[in-house]
Amino acid sequence: MFCMMASFNFNLSHFRSVAEAERHYLDHHVPLARRLPGLRQYVIGRTVDFGGSPADRYRAAVLVFDDADAFRGAYRSDVGRELRADEKRLIADAIVTFADTQQILPA
């Protein structure tokens, strides 16, 4: 499996408030991302302070594909191009990490 993990803030220069950006994220961006070809798992959430680790970003997301080629193909698709354009408007201060992973559970 190939995972893209991102933590990010909203780009408030394009939205009147965090609430408006959040609505756009949940009502437009997330449904668009769900349409990425080859997407196997998709997890989103708000970051939290935990155990001495501060939440320095507002949101986080994990997208899982079969492999790096599937990820590349998804982001080169029409949906992927539309998603990237929306990311440029919606997302700020992103930290993105990629991982070649293996599933341990469920067995």
Image (cartoon, rainbow, N blue to C red):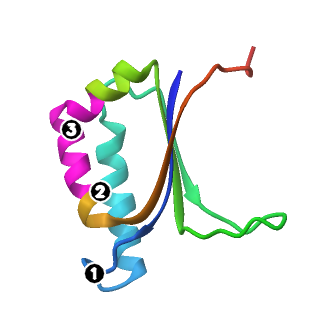
Say whether residue 55 is left or right of residue 13. right
Task: Please name the predominant secondary structure of the magenta segment in the image.
Answer: helix
Quadrant in the picture for the C terminus:
top right
Queried whether the magenta region covers residue 35, the answer comes back as no
Queried whether the magenta region covers residue 75, the answer comes back as yes
Tell me the residue at 66%/20% (across/down). Answer: 103
Q: Nearer the viewer, mark 3 or mark 2?
A: 2
Q: Nearer the viewer, mark 3 or mark 1?
A: 1
**SS at mark 1?**
loop
- Residue 71: x %, y % from top left: 36, 28
Mark 1, other Cα within 10 Å: few <14 / some 14–19 / many ≥20: few
| Residue position for label 3 | 79
Sequence-wise, the earlier of marks 3 and 1 is: 1
- So how many labels did they put on this image? 3
Sequence-wise, the earlier of marks 3 and 2 is: 3
Tell me the residue at 18%/42% (across/down). Answer: 81
Say whether residue 44 is left or right of residue 29. right
Q: Which residues are magenta?
A: 74-86
Q: Identify the mark at residue 87; answer none if there is no mark.
A: 2
| Residue position for label 1 | 13
Which residue is the extreme one toward the bottom? 16
Sequence-wise, the earlier of marks 1 and 2 is: 1
Which residue is the extreme one toward the top? 107
103 shown above or below 46: above
Which residue is the extreme one toward the left? 78
Say whether residue 86 is left or right of residue 17. left
**SS at mark 3?**
helix
